[in-house]
Image: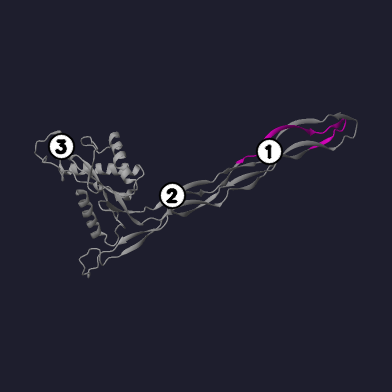
């Protein structure tokens, strides 16, 4: 009988808030909550080029070697016993260093650009309007309407590096130069008996080109970046009714043993959440999580501690794959004690432990 009255009371409250959309063919003694079909998204990786491939040029200078060459510096002649020959000096030119080329590198030049990637497609949500100010009905659901409001898409802009002109070389000549040496030549021979004079030789050094300047080209590969974007697979937002155990619509104790002053879930606490709360959430219903403290410590610190404990349970459920939209977490500090153990009252540890509690209850999704 008690269960039936609780179900009837719950359905009366639901009828007052959602009179336009009640479960079809409800069973007596059953409890129901509103659930929203979640949107189903998937991640896709998009790879883009953020820096192009380009050519890098390294120049090598020309190579030379020095050689020694034997040259004639005085021709053979004759010497007369009476009238000697007449000689004069003559300058002879030769290439001391041959012509070559020098290479200068003109570096590649770059520009900047950007590319905008859609990381989340546009969607929409249902929202109920405020009650019309001139509405004469006492029903809070009259004179209101539902709007399907769009949610703008999300974008990310990625900077790019573009190639304006690739590296190249400019060749400029390196002129060689000449040197001279002097040789004696006979201008007038002897007019009498001559005596042979042997030729005279010498050695010179000159620099010759072994290998002209050359270049080496190295290709620098392009750079890429992978961006992850969300793609809508199935559109959610459809509201349905789900049958739940009637006990779950009231605050149910989650027997988590918090260490004194701590908001960190122990391994045992996580096992309790896995066994008691995860199966309820995996049915698709929404849950409100409330955390409380005992009266020991300041009210400000206890409020903060209870909020952090409620958030710790919420974060753990999200890490287990629960949609954040199905979770509501609140801390009440020492404001809702279950017994007489307020500030200044002597109580046992068991009595204080009864106030250090975390509860959950199934709620309607808006």
Q: Provide the residue span drawn in magenta.
A: 59-88
Dot 3: what SS? helix
Which residue is under mark 2? Answer: 42
Please say if 167 is above or below 265: below
Please say if 250 is above or below 125: above
Q: Earlier in the sequence, mark 3 or mark 2?
A: 2
Quadrant in the picture for residue 63: top right
The residue drawn where x is 60% and y is 46% is 104
- Please provide percent x and percent y for residue 243: 30, 51
- Please provide percent x and percent y for residue 111: 50, 53
Please say if 157 is above or below 185: below
Q: Earlier in the sequence, mark 1 or mark 2?
A: 2
Which residue is under mark 3? Answer: 352
Which residue is under mark 1? Answer: 211
The residue drawn where x is 55% and y is 49% is 108
Apparent side of residue 315 relative to residue 2 in the rendered image (left or right): right
Looking at this view, is 95 or 251 the one in front?
251
């Amino acid at each position: 009988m008690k269960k039936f009255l609780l179900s009837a009371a719950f359905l009366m409250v639901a009828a007052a808030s959602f009179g336009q959309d009640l479960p079809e063919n409800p069973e007596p003694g059953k409890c129901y909550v509103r659930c929203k079909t979640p949107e189903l998204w998937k991640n896709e990786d998009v790879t883009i080029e953020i820096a192009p491939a380009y050519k890098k040029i390294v120049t090598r200078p020309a190579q030379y070697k020095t050689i020694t060459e034997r040259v004639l510096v005085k021709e053979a002649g004759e010497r007369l016993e009476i009238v000697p020959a007449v000689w004069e000096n003559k300058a002879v030119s030769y290439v001391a260093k041959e012509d070559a080329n020098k290479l200068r590198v003109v570096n590649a030049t770059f520009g900047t650009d950007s590319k905008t990637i859609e990381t989340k497609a546009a969607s929409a949500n249902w929202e109920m309007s405020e009650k019309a100010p001139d509405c004469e009905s006492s029903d809070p659901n009259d004179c209101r309407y539902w709007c399907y409001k769009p949610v703008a898409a999300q974008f990310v802009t990625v900077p790019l590096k573009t190639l304006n002109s690739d590296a190249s070389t400019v060749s400029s000549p390196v002129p060689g130069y000449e040197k001279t040496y002097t040789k004696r030549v006979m201008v007038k021979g002897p007019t009498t008996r001559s005596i042979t004079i042997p030729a005279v030789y010498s050695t010179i050094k000159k620099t010759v080109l072994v290998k002209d300047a050359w270049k080496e080209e190295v290709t620098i590969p392009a750079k890429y970046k992978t961006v992850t974007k969300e793609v809508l697979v199935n559109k959610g937002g459809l509201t349905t009714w789900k049958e739940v155990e009637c006990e779950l619509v009231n605050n149910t104790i989650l027997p988590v043993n918090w260490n004194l002053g701590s908001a960190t879930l122990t391994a045992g606490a996580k096992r309790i959440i896995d066994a008691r709360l995860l199966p309820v959430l995996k049915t698709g219903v929404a849950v409100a999580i409330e955390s409380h403290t005992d009266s020991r410590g300041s009210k400000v610190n206890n409020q903060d501690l209870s909020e952090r404990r409620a958030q710790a349970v919420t974060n753990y459920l999200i890490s287990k794959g629960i949609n954040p939209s199905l979770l509501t977490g609140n801390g009440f500090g020492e404001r809702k004690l279950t017994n007489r153990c307020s500030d200044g009252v002597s109580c046992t540890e068991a009595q204080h432990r009864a106030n250090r509690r975390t509860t959950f209850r199934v709620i309607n999704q808006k």
